[in-house]
């Protein structure tokens, strides 16, 4: 048996980017920052280390939620991992991203 489920909560690292596939399907791209806690070997103190995760969401829901998000907002997502690989300029490239199936808005950042 194999399970491919991801649950993350964090802050948007950039404003969402909405585009469409050649077939017209809306695609929303977001960046999510999530923290990992580790003990600093030098000081012995616990520190937060950020991880940056690329996420994509498809369909009319992606188009709808894109209007309600901006950089800094805290969200929670559920989805699955997708690994892609391709060649560009003779170099082998790879990417691991989260395909978002469900999203929840946790808080919006409002700069004064």
Image (spheres, helix red, strand yellow):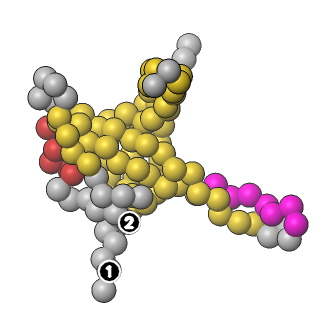
Q: Residue 24: image x %, image y %? A: 11, 29
Query: Is 32 within the magenta?
Result: no
Q: Residues within 10 Å of mark 1 (few under 14, many from 20)?
A: few
Residue 12 left/right relative to 4: left
- The residue positioned 54% from the left and 17% from the top of the image is 2
Is 59 situated above or below 88? below
Residue receiving disc 2: 72
Q: How far is the residue under mark 1 from the one under mark 2? A: 10 Å
The residue positioned farthest toward the bottom in the image shown: 112
Residue receiving disc 1: 111
**SS at mark 2?**
loop
The residue positioned farthest toward the front in the image shown: 89
- The residue positioned 51% from the left and 50% from the top of the image is 52
Q: Which residues are magenta?
A: 36-42
Q: Residue 51: image x %, image y %? A: 57, 51
- The residue positioned 15% from the left and 48% from the top of the image is 64
Q: Quadrant of the N terminus?
A: top right
Q: Which mark is residue 76?
A: none
Q: Quadrant of the C terminus?
A: bottom left
């Amino acid at each position: 048996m194999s399970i491919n489920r991801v649950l993350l909560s964090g802050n948007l690292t950039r404003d969402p980017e909405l585009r469409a596939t050649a077939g017209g399907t809306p695609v929303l791209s977001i960046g999510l920052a999530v923290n990992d806690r580790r003990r600093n070997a030098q000081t012995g103190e616990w520190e937060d280390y950020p991880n940056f995760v690329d996420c994509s969401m498809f369909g009319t829901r992606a188009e709808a939620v894109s209007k309600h998000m901006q950089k800094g907002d805290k969200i929670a997502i559920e989805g699955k991992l997708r690994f892609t690989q391709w060649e560009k300029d003779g170099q082998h490239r790879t990417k691991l991203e989260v395909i978002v199936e469900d999203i929840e808005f946790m808080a919006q950042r409002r700069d004064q």
